[in-house]
Image: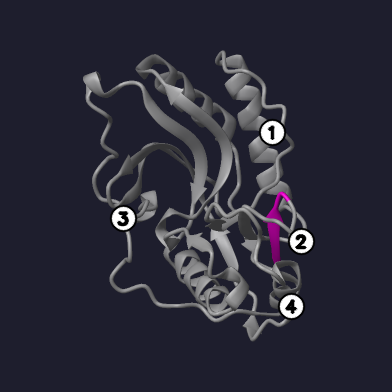
Amino acid sequence: MRCWPAKKILPPDAPAMIPASARKAAPVSPRRDAWPVRAFIGIPLPAEGQEAVAGLQDYLRALPPFSEFRWVPPGNVHITLRFLGDISGDEAAAASTALASGSAGGRAFSFPLDRLGAFPRAENPSVLWAGPMEPPPALVSLAENLQSALVRAGFPAEERPFRPHLTLARRRRKKHPPRGLAAALREADEARPGPCPVLRMSEAALIQSDLRPGGVVYTPLHTAILIDE
């Protein structure tokens, strides 16, 4: 299987989540007067994962049908485990407890980028994504345990199926999609110029999302480290 070349990111091209393994200081909690905050539980990319995503985005960006997309900064790309929306301080504490409980005993996993896709459909997509052919069992187990822990903590059950992926880009609002999008996506998925990267995911986090003039900034509020053997 061949894939896309990675791209070294020096310096980062946008504010990014920093994996716990690379942080020296504890995550900063929002001020008491800052609640509610917009938040989700997700899995941030390691540095090599950000480089792999940047290379893939460069590869796709050069193809004409993808010129109408806004590309997610590699440091902001993540696997979403559960979107929470606007939460209060008490709900953030409950979500942190659920994350700790749901990830207890959870194992790190490999996440290959060997598939490209689009939501809701390739002919008229709003999102481009990359992910594995089959979701890693350890990731599926983590997601299921986390959902159960969130329900026990008082959050509503998630009705949508879990489809693990990395969002690469979102299409700007246009009345009609550009021609050849589906064919270009299919060709890009098949024409891989290098070995497919396999990312090693070893943590999950409760993450605050702030929309600022320079773009979205993600701040980890609580991090759970997965067992990596």
Direction from residue 87 to residue 11 in the image, left or right: left
SS for dot 3: loop
Check if mark 3's residue and mark 2's residue have beta carbons within 8 Å: no
Give the amino acid at mark 3. Answer: Pro
Residue, x 22% and y 19% (percent of image)?
A: 33
Which numbered marker is on residue 133?
A: 2
Q: Nearer the viewer, residue 12 or 198?
A: 12
Q: What separation in Å lies between label 3 and label 2 (alpha carbons)?
A: 30 Å
Of marks 4 and 2, the one in the foreground: 4
Q: What separation in Å lies between label 4 and label 3 (alpha carbons)?
A: 32 Å
**Percent position of residue 104, x then y:** 56, 34
**In terms of sequence position, does the residue under pointer 4 or pointer 2 come before the other?**
2
Q: Count the marks.
A: 4
| Residue under numbered circle 1 | 144
Q: Nearer the viewer, residue 91 or 60?
A: 60
Direction from residue 93 to residue 179 in the image, left or right: right
On whether residue 155 falls in the magenta region, the answer is no
**Percent position of residue 174, x then y:** 57, 55
Q: Quadrant of residue 149?
A: top right
User: Label 2 neighbourhood size at 10 Å, few (<14), some (14-19), many (20+)?
Assistant: few
Residue 143 in view = yes
| Residue under numbered circle 3 | 15
Of marks 2 and 1, the one in the foreground: 2
Residue 104 in view = no
Q: What separation in Å lies between label 4 and label 2 (alpha carbons)?
A: 16 Å
Which numbered marker is on residue 187?
A: 4
Check if mark 4's residue and mark 3's residue have beta carbons within 8 Å: no
Check if mark 3's residue and mark 1's residue have beta carbons within 8 Å: no
SS for dot 4: helix
User: In which quadrant of the rendered image does the N terminus lie?
Assistant: bottom right
Give the amino acid at mark 1. Answer: Glu
Of marks 4 and 1, the one in the foreground: 4
